[in-house]
C-alpha cells in the first residue's frame, strides 16, 4: 500500500506538471529501487523527450540497457551523454564495461584508459583493466592493474581474490594463498575467499586445512553447490572416496539439474569398479545433457568394463554421431570394435 501511494503521488505530480524533470527522476529512481527496470526505462525515455540532453537520464537508461543486455542501446545512450559531459570519467568507464562484455578488447581498453586519464585515482578502473587483460590471458598486465587497485583501496577483498586467481593461474600457489588469506582477513564471511582458500590448501596437499575451510564455506551457506563438489574433489585427492561420494550426493540433492556432481560421482564409482551404479548415474547425466559426446563415451567405456561390447558399440556410435570430428573417440571405437571382432572369432560371445 505504501509503495502504491508513493507511485500514485509521483504520477499525479507528473500529470499536473509534465515539464517538471525532478518528478520523472524521483519516480524512475523509485522504480529502480524496486527492481522495476521496465517502468524506470519508460520514464527516462519520457524525460528525454522533454530534455534530450539530461545527463542523469542518459546514464541511467544506458545502465538499464546494459543490465538487460541491450548493448547497442546502452552504447548509444552513453555516447549521447559524452556530448553533455565530455570530461565525466563514468561515461567512459561504463562504455568500457559494455565493450568488455561484448568482447571488443580494443574499444574496451581505449575507454578504460580515457576514464583513467580523467580519474587516475579510481581503483574500480584499475580493477576493470585487470579483468580485461585477464580475459585475454595477459596475466602479467592484469596483475599489474590489480596491484594498483589494491594500492588505492586496501579494503576491497575482491581485488585480493582477483590477483590471487592470477597467481594461481601462473603456478604461484603460495603467493595466491597469501592474497586469499588477506581477502579472508577483511571478511571471513566472504564465501568466495573461503572456498578459494579451501581449494588452494587442497592444491598444496594440506587436506586438513582444506577440509577446515570447506566446512567454513558450508557453515556460511550449506546449500552452496560448489563447496560440496570441490570438497569431494579434495577428498578424492586424499583417497577418501567414501566422503567424496557423500559430498557429491549432497551436491546432487542441492541441485539435481547440474551435471558436474553426477559425472564426478559416476567416475568415482567406475574407479571403485561399481560399474552398474556408475551406468545409472551416467544415464541420468545423459538426460540432462542428451547431446554431449563425452557422456556417451563414458557410458560406452563402462559397458566395456562389464564386457558388454554390444552396448559399448551402440554408445560409441552415438558419441561419434554427436562429435564426428573427435578423432580420439573414433580411435577408441576402432580399437574396441577390433577387440570385439577378435573375441567373436574366439567364440567368447557365442
Image: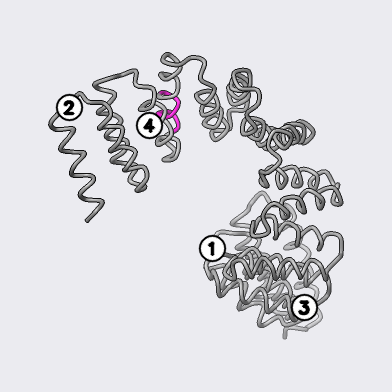
Label at residue 18: 2
Q: CA distance from mark 4 to mark 1?
A: 40 Å
Q: Residue at x 37, y 31 (%)?
A: 61
Per the image, label 1 sits on a secondary structure element best described as loop
Quarter of the figure with residue 134: top right
What's the distance in space between the residues labelled 4 and 3, CA to CA? 53 Å
Dot 2 falls on a residue whose secondary structure is loop
Report the residue at 70% width, 33% height from top: 152
Residue 58 image offset from top left, x and y in percent = 38, 25
Start-end of magenta stretch: 71-76
The residue beneath circle 4 is 61
> Tag 2 or tag 4, which sits nearer the N-term?
2
Q: Residue furthest bottom?
A: 350
Q: Which of labels 4 and 2 is toward the front?
A: 2
Residue at image x 68%, y 73%? 265
Q: In the image shown, does 217 or 242 lie closer to the viewer?
A: 217
Query: Is there CB contact under 8 Å for labels 4 and 2?
Result: no
Q: How far apart are the alpha carbons under marks 1 and 3?
A: 28 Å
Give the mark nearest the N terminus, 4 or 3: 4
For mark 4, give the secondary structure: helix
Q: Is residue 78 left or right of residue 57?
A: right
Q: Picture quarter containing residue 259? A: bottom right
Q: Main secondary structure of the magenta part?
A: helix
Identify the residue at horizontal 52%, vertical 67% (top origin). Answer: 257
Which residue is the site of mark 1?
290
Image coordinates of residue 275 in percent, x first then y, are 71, 80
Earlier-in-chain disc, 1 versus 3:
3
Q: Inspect the magenta stretch and tell me whether residue 68 lies in it.
A: no
Q: Nearer the viewer, mark 2 or mark 3?
A: 2
Which label was assigned to residue 181? none
Amino acid at each position: 500500500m505504501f509503495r502504491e501511494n508513493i507511485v500514485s503521488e509521483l504520477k499525479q505530480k507528473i500529470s499536473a506538471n509534465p515539464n517538471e524533470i525532478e518528478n520523472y527522476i524521483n519516480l524512475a529512481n523509485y522504480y529502480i529501487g524496486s527492481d522495476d527496470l521496465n517502468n524506470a526505462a519508460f520514464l527516462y525515455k519520457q524525460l528525454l523527450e522533454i530534455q534530450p540532453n539530461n545527463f542523469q537520464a542518459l546514464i541511467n537508461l544506458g545502465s538499464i540497457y546494459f543490465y538487460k543486455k541491450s548493448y547497442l542501446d546502452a552504447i548509444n545512450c552513453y555516447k549521447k551523454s559524452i556530448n553533455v559531459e565530455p570530461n565525466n570519467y563514468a561515461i567512459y568507464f561504463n562504455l568500457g564495461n559494455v565493450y568488455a562484455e561484448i568482447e571488443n578488447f580494443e574499444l574496451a581498453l581505449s575507454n578504460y584508459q580515457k576514464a583513467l586519464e580523467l580519474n587516475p585515482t579510481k581503483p574500480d578502473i584499475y580493477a576493470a583493466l585487470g579483468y580485461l587483460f585477464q580475459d585475454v590471458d595477459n596475466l602479467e598486465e592484469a596483475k599489474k592493474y590489480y596491484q594498483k587497485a589494491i594500492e588505492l583501496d586496501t579494503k576491497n577483498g575482491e581485488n585480493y581474490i582477483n590477483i590471487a586467481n592470477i597467481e594461481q593461474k601462473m603456478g604461484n600457489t603460495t603467493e595466491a594463498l597469501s592474497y586469499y588469506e588477506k581477502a579472508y582477513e577483511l571478511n571471513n564471511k566472504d564465501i568466495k575467499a573461503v572456498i578459494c582458500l579451501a581449494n588452494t590448501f587442497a592444491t598444496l596437499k594440506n587436506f586438513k586445512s582444506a577440509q577446515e575451510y570447506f566446512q567454513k564455506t558450508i557453515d556460511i551457506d550449506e546449500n552452496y553447490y560448489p563447496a560440496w563438489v570441490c570438497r569431494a574433489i579434495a577428498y578424492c585427492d586424499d583417497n577418501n572416496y567414501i566422503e567424496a561420494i557423500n559430498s557429491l550426493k549432497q551436491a546432487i540433492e542441492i541441485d539435481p539439474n547440474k551435471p558436474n556432481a553426477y559425472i564426478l560421482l559416476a567416475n568415482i564409482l567406475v574407479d571403485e569398479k561399481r560399474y552398474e551404479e556408475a551406468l545409472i548415474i551416467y544415464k541420468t547425466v545423459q538426460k540432462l545433457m542428451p547431446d554431449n559426446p563425452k557422456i556417451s563415451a563414458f557410458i560406452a567405456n563402462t559397458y566395456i568394463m562389464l564386457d558388454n561390447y554390444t552396448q559399448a558399440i551402440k554408445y560409441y556410435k552415438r558419441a561419434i554421431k554427436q562429435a564426428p570430428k573427435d578423432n580420439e573417440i573414433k580411435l577408441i571405437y576402432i580399437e574396441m570394435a577390433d577387440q570385439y571382432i577378435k573375441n567373436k572369432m574366439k567364440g567368447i560371445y557365442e
